[in-house]
Amino acid sequence: MGEWLKVTVAETIRWNDALYSLCFRAPLPAFKAGQFVRVGLDVDGERIARPYSLVNAPDETPHEIFFNVVPDGPLSPRLARLKVGDSLLVHTSVTGTMTMERTPEHRHLWLFATGTALGAFLSILKTDAPWKRAERVVLCHSVRHVADMAYGETIRQLEMQHGDRFDFVPLVTREACPAALRERIQAALASGDLERHVDLELRPEDAHVMLCGNSEMIEEVRGLLESRGLSRHRRREPGQITVEKYH
């Protein structure tokens, strides 16, 4: 269901040579924070589209996506070249299961993201839902280089707004950064460095974990969590892990 809309670019943000955010105005239906939308362009008579998580909260405009440029990709380099006033295509069916509405009760919310998957969690954190339900929220964002870290101002606003209830843990894997752990999420979890860093134990009895990003991180972290007694959350089988594969 749904239809394709021709919409207008409101802003393009260039974080580095390969990392962009694109803002656009579109009459999308009501959606839930954490969901994604298909964005596309017509190229040589063919419609090329990909799913991108919305960074904006449901009550925010314009809509916003966060993406990396695949040099030989058919779509992302073209999206990066769009200017204010240019047109692109957006599908009105906004979907995805990684939403707060689908999570069971918990005291501590752990959000693990790699790369541009950060956008989905920012959408969630800009709403009231996680703060009404969790005593503590831990957001972990893993990137390769310091230059790949984005949305610093948004994260600082969350820190100011929520104080000790919010911990942001950047992980930079390929260069030293004083403010970041220099290891992948799965290594930091396995070693205990992550929990020591935030002074909080990740336990099945009071935690819910949301995973979004590359498949390797998701599968390895799931394995570590399952070894601790956590399980994937499903409607008919409540658990402590929610997964959204980004590619």
Image (cartoon, rainbow, N blue to C red):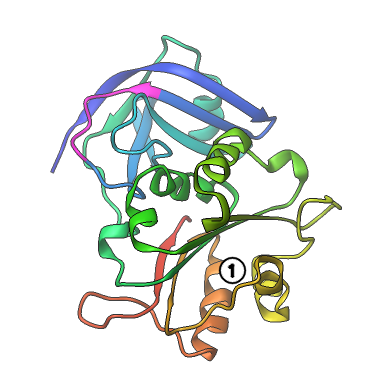
Identify the amino acid type marked 1: Glu
**Image spot of residue 140 (x, y percent):** 60, 58
Q: Going 51% across and 77% down the picture, which residue do you hit?
A: 222
**Image spot of residue 1 (x, y percent):** 13, 43
Question: What is the span of residues highlighted in magenta in the rendered image?
Answer: 24-30
The magenta stretch spans residue 60? no
**Image spot of residue 198 (x, y percent):** 65, 66
**In the rendered image, the vertical position of residue 2 relative to residue 219, given as above or below:** above
Secondary element at tag 1: helix
**In the rendered image, the vertical position of residue 232 relative to residue 111, given as above or below:** below
Residue 242's quadrant in the figure? bottom left
Q: Going 34% across and 25% down the picture, which residue do you hit?
A: 61
Q: Is residue 56 visible?
A: yes
**In the rendered image, the vertical position of residue 49 relative to residue 113, given as above or below:** above
Image mark count: 1
**Image spot of residue 220 (x, y percent):** 58, 76
Residue 48's quadrant in the figure? top left
Q: Going 27% across and 24% down the picture, which residue do you hit?
A: 26
Would you say the magenta stretch is mainly helix, strand or loop?
A: loop
Residue sticking out furthest to the front: 164
User: Is residue 62 found left or right of 15 in the rendered image?
Assistant: left
Crowd around label 1: few <14 · some 14–19 · many ≥20 (10 Å): few
Which residue occupies the foreground of this view, 130 or 177? 130
Which residue occupies the foreground of this view, 162 or 65? 162
User: Is residue 19 found left or right of 134 in the rendered image?
Assistant: right
The magenta stretch spans residue 28? yes
User: Is residue 36 found left or right of 121 in the rendered image?
Assistant: left
> Residue under circle 1?
216
User: Is residue 135 found left or right of 200 in the rendered image?
Assistant: left
Q: Going 78% across and 51% down the picture, which residue do you hit?
A: 179
